[in-house]
Image (tube, grey):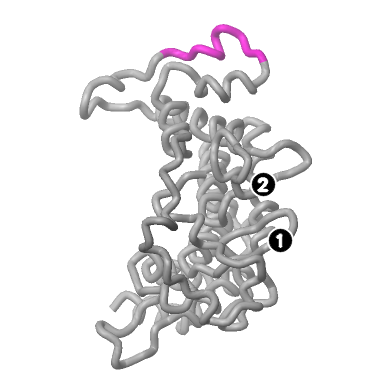
Amino acid sequence: MIVDEPMHDRVRADRGPADRSRQDRTRTDRARPDRIRPADPRPGRRALLGAAACSAVALPAAAAAAAPAASAASAAPAAPTGSGRAGAQVSGAERRQRARRAVEALRLNFSQDAPSEMLSELYPRRDGDPDYSYCWPLSQARAAACELSYALPTPPRAVNAFVASLERAQEAYWYPAGGETDLPGYTAACDAEQGPHGDMYYDDNAWVGLQEVEEHLMTNGRRGDLGRARAVLELLRSGEDTDPDAPSPGGIFWTQAGEESGRNTVSTVPSAKLALRLHVLTGEDTMLRDAQRWMT
């Protein structure tokens, strides 16, 4: 799936994160024009999902061609009410319909052929594409499908199956051997030959940890792995900047990729949110202190 940040730069060697030194994991060529990959003209995840959610057609043309035959009534639902007017009210029923269209477009366009349960990074697939999507896009697809599944009174069977497959796919990125800090976590990438590999990004891990907590809360504890969320929090603690002489000290680094990393909102705030939500669930004061420290 195409995302805002250069996800292809997250993988730089054909080895697991624990096998690489800080020196050979530091990129120095990112700004060189000859190393910048041209923009891919293929539609990205946002374009496809936006088209599916806002058009009168249930799915983009490519996805509809791959879908089973449907009746005329189901294949061409009524156009969204007021969608052409800025600031127009959108009914709850229409919002649910848009969400269903978006998740269905995601499932049909980015799911790989069985028996694989992984997602593709780009649509349509071409030679040279990574085997599977990167960790962060998959985690967000999983979050969207889960939200839809639990929001609908009677979710379609295909949506429930999609949620379960994405939960299993997420595990393919888990690297028990650990990275720079020797703690397990989710790597940026995964492929059929190497399994999980690439650097560990703290923001990726925070989002997956939050998803485990969300599922636990939405299902009253029937789903969602709080043990895994705790393990992710330990990894995030290892990514905290503890240098008192650093400018504006504190916060969570973005990645374990050496000098390429910086401290920013996208890694610090989700980490603090995960610590706070786990504190609410467990009552452990250490987690509350983590959240307060990272947000000050």
When the figure is inspected, residue 233 is found, relative to residue 143, above or below; the finding is below
- List x then y, in percent, for residue 179: 60, 77
Residue 71: say if magenta: yes
Q: Is residue 43 above or below residue 58?
A: below
Is residue 52 highlighted in magenta? no
- Magenta stretch: dominant SS? loop
- The CA distance from mark 2 to mark 1 is 12 Å
Image point 67% across, 46% down: which residue? 118
Out of 291 and 188, give the one closest to the viewer.
188
Query: Could you say which is closer to the camera, residue 23 or residue 286?
Result: 23
Residues drawn in magenta: 69-78
User: How busy is the neighbourhood of tag 1: few (under 14 within 10 Å), some, or many (20 plus)?
Assistant: some
Q: Give the residue at mark 1.
A: 195
The C terminus sits in image quarter? bottom left
Q: Residue at x 50, y 23 (%)?
A: 60
Residue type at mark 1: give it: Gly
Task: Choose the circle earlier in sequence order: 2 or 1.
Answer: 2
Q: For the residues carrying marks 2 and 1, which lies nearer the camera in this image?
A: 1
Is 227 left or right of 203, judged from the image as shown? right
Can you identify the residue that label 2 sits on? 118
> Where on the picture, by quarter, is residue 156?
top right
**Amino acid type, label 2:** Met
Residue 166 x, y percent position in the rendering: 64, 48
Rendering quarter of residue 234: bottom right
Callout 2–callout 1 Cβ contact below 8 Å? no
Label drawn at residue 248: none
User: What is the x, y in percent for residue 56?
Assistant: 43, 17
